[in-house]
Image (tube, grey):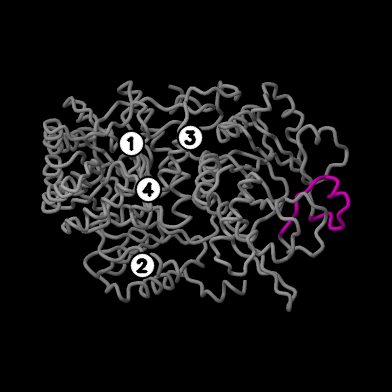
Amino acid sequence: MSLYCNSLTQYSRLKTKEVKVGNLLLGNFHPIRVQTMTTTDTMNTIATVEQTIRCIEAGAELVRITAPSKKEAENLLHIKNELQKRGYSTPLVADIHFTPNAAEIAARIIEKVRINPGNYVDKKKFEQIDYNDVEYAEEIDRIRERFTPLIKICKEYGTAMRIGTNHGSLSDRIMSRYGDTAKGMVESAMEFLRIARDENYHNIILSMKSSNPQVMVQAYRWLIQQMDKEFGECYPLHLGVTEAGDGEDGRVKSAAGIGTLLEDGIGDTIRVSLTEDPELEIPVCKDLVKRYNFSSNEKNNIPAVNKISYSPLEYTRRATFEVANTGKTHVPIVIADLRHIENITPKTLQSIGYTYFKMSDKWRISDSAADYILTGKPELDFALPGTLKVITWQNHVQQAKEKDKYFPMFDAKGYLENENKNNTLNFVMIDCFSDETTINDFTFLDELANDASVVFCLSSNNKNEMQAIRRMFIELMNRGIKNPVVIFSKSNWHTTDEHLIHFATNAGALFLDGFGDGICLNMAHESYDELVAQHQQSTQGRNYSSNKTVEQFINNTAFSILQATRTRISKTEYISCPSCGRTLFDLQETTAKIRNRTNHLKGVKIAIMGCIVNGPGEMADADFGYVGSGPGKITLYKGKEIVKRNIDSNVAVDELINLLKENNAWIEPEEVETK
């Protein structure tokens, strides 16, 4: 095994042990399984059964149900019996956190239990404890004593287990020794896995979840390396990004994390955690998984990697020099590809963040305004907003009157042969290892290298688009070439959700590894026309510009990818749990209310958690938290510190706004509008 996967240049599934969950097989090259989790009260048997059936009929191959105490664990028998009575045999999973007794009951009833090593034995008090080696070993013995009974029950009943680490709920003991790190997440799971192996129990799946895709990806890679180092084998992996939120943002965040790993053949089952009805998670899972329904033995012409000059286990942005507003310490630029638009007008630019007011002859620029537009047309016939610039073909740039606003795009050969280059900024497109292009001689890179005016634009028509572009990044780094790079990703899919998954996976995977100083998303002509038609149909005859709608979707997706990968923050970030039977308020309605009141607060991270299980620990790096603490009661946090307890839920959103104001995190919406 190379690094954490079989290949950095070709899709190849990672071999894992085979695990049986009821009648379902996971791992060992079986299909990637999709699953979700119910949101009903587990004690409401019929409601839980009916929601489970909706999930199964949507395509769920496993369904998880919370069992926070013994009574819910016992009621799993009634739920399972009712499902079987109605003709459903899909395996069920009990979600356990603080109650080993509940896990031991559930393991006798249903096909799989999920435990969280951060709180299964340990109680989190956010205390720093300095253990010496003897004391630490004694803590492991305490875990062994409490965990072994569950292992024996699982062995006796043929029950599978997921050891599911969450970044935000690491125990005080792990935090004290390893800190709030991906390595600490791995060790938290490995402690339990070693005990299970000592008992000759192997029907185990593992997960390393975080609301931060960077941390999540790194933790899985660490885990694979550690299992290979200690055991010479790998257990199946359940992939997920916790508290991803809802809508497009939730889908982009999930696809960036899950898709990055799937691209490298990692993952045996996935769950997309959205703050929506659980059956709506399944189509997103399917869109992710269907991208890998092909033989991993298919060859491509991407050269093998002999060495890499970066660490895939920690985030470091690739070092570059500055070209105009690109590279070095600049946030990644966003290029809006408007080549599909025949006639670009001021109204067109509204879809990419620029609103023109004719009466005052002024532009309002949003936080999600593209930095450049790409067009194959000559100079536009109107004055551009002050911050916006245009990329077009070199002959058009030569004819433009506003030379400081227009910059040329070349291919590599054309740039090397052309004498009419821009003195300050030239974009050079490189098609990385496409089916028509076999590049084993990289000397042309050396000719372009360190030209102080060149920004590379990397794209690929190769089936392995992400791997091809990554391979070119590796070549640039190995050769010490530090020109900034814009990542171009092209989608040939059909629906909005498919495009969203494609862009977030391919571009997100590269940004999570520290690659990229800019992003440009585009579609094949057929895909673009198809999406325009879909948007026209969805408006039901309302008067609007279909081009604007598609362009706005593409522009918003680009900014969402940068936000999800923590490389450019342009809006409020919501860390919102997906709801379950433990939730103490209407999570979807409350999330919508909070989003409606706070979505203008650029860069503020707000966690919205249904209960204490997904409370202060799961919020990880949120600035403020809104957590269910009892029926109709909310507790507010600043970071991990409680500031207001047991507030009536009817006034809790207002109290959250007051908390933001008290901590100078609030701006009145009208102030944002006038900026």
Q: Residue type at mark 1? A: Val
Mark 4, mark 2: which one is toward the viewer?
4
**Residue corresponding to mark 2:** 589
Q: Residue type at mark 2? A: Glu
Q: Residue type at mark 3? A: Glu
**Residue 584 spot, x, y in % from top left:** 25, 64
- Taking the image as shown, residue 25 lies to the left or right of residue 283, namely left
Disc with the residue nearer the chain's start (3 vs 1)? 1
The answer for how far apart the CA atoms under marks 3 and 1 are is 21 Å
**Residue corresponding to mark 4:** 282
Q: Measuring 27% from the left and 64% from the top, which residue is drawn there?
A: 628
Q: Secondary structure at mark 2?
A: helix
**Residue 667 spot, x, y in % from top left:** 51, 72
The answer for how far apart the CA atoms under marks 2 and 3 are is 34 Å
Looking at the rendered image, the quarter that the C terminus falls into is bottom right
**Residue corresponding to mark 1:** 186
Q: Secondary structure at mark 1?
A: helix
Magenta-highlighted residues: 388-405
Q: Quadrant of residue 306?
A: top right
Q: Secondary structure at mark 4?
A: helix
Q: Measuring 24% from the left and 53% from the top, which residue is drawn there?
A: 125
Seen from the viewer's position, the closer of residues 152 and 23 is 23
- Taking the image as shown, residue 549 lies to the left or right of residue 641, namely right
The answer for how far apart the CA atoms under marks 4 and 2 are is 21 Å
Q: Does the magenta portion include 313?
A: no
- Taking 620 as reference, is 348 above or below it? below
**Residue corresponding to mark 3:** 263
